[in-house]
Amino acid sequence: MWQKMIGDTRLVLTEGDITRAGTEAIVNAANSRLAGGGGVDGAIHAAGGPEIMAECRRIGGCPTGQAVITTGGQLPAAKVIHTVGPVYRGRPDDARLLAACYTNSLELAARHHLKSVAFPSISTGAYGYPLDQAARVALTAVRDWLRDHPGLLQEVRFVLFGRAALETYQEAADQLV
Ligand code: APR
């Protein structure tokens, strides 16, 4: 585990399964139809139960870079924030859209008075974003948002899947945060 205070907010990097995170909200790496899938998305719907998908159907969809919020169903987290990462294409827009996923998710959490949020490493599975590049974009976006919005969140946590992912994020955090 790695942690550091950014103003009043604790930024934590940890290894594990995000469906078990004890934060008030967890973030899902969804697709733009909010239709479910594999990876984090599959794990969240499997652990949280059908209420989450019922709300996703009512919402209907979410553009890349944006975020929407549903119940957490049976998850320990009260809420799931669904954000849609870019499919990696090696263009400048990739980083802009990936950063937007993080800042729009944090905005939504703050608007709903949620005090703690856990993120997975968005876009780095099925969507093919190189992990080291994604780590830099994610940590820069979260760091900048927390500096600009002091006092709103108690904790922002990254729950990384596997030791290698945690180490990649830790190396980026040591340089950036
Ligand atoms: N907890 C935390 N991280 C996880 C978990 C989990 N339970 N399961 C997978 N991961 C990690 C992966 O190792 C990867 O680094 O989450 C990261 C994101 O991978 P994906 O879940 O594949 O998300 P993404 O690349 O954004 O692709 C989204 O995949 O499942 C579909 O519906 C989803 O179409 C969408 C696409």
Image: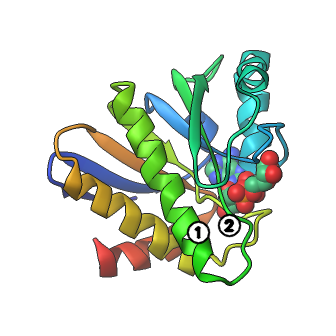
Q: Name the residue nearer the viewer: 6 or 31.
A: 31
Q: At label 1, which amino acid type do we have?
A: Ala
Which mark is on residue 52? Answer: none
Q: Residue at x 17, y 40 (%)?
A: 151
Q: Residue at x 50, y 58 (%)?
A: 100
Q: Residue at x 62, y 73 (%)?
A: 94
- Residue 125 lies, with reference to residue 9, above or below; the image says below
In x, y percent, where is residue 61? 74, 36
| Residue that numbered label 1 is attached to | 165
Cβ of disc 1 within 8 Å of ligand 1? yes
Which mark is on residue 124? Answer: 2
The quarter of the displayed image where residue 82 is located: top right
Would you call the spot at circle 1 few (<14 residues within 10 Å), some (14-19), or many (20 or more)? some
Nearest-to-viewer mark from 2 and 1: 2
Q: At label 2, which amino acid type do we have?
A: Thr
Would you call the spot at circle 2 few (<14 residues within 10 Å), some (14-19), or many (20 or more)? many
Whether residue 2 is visible to the viewer of this picture, yes or no, is: no
Cβ of disc 2 within 8 Å of ligand 1? yes
Q: Quadrant of ligand 1?
A: bottom right
CB of mark 2 within 8 Å of CB of mark 1? yes
> Of helix, strand and loop, which one carries label 1?
helix
Q: Residue at x 17, y 46 (%)?
A: 150
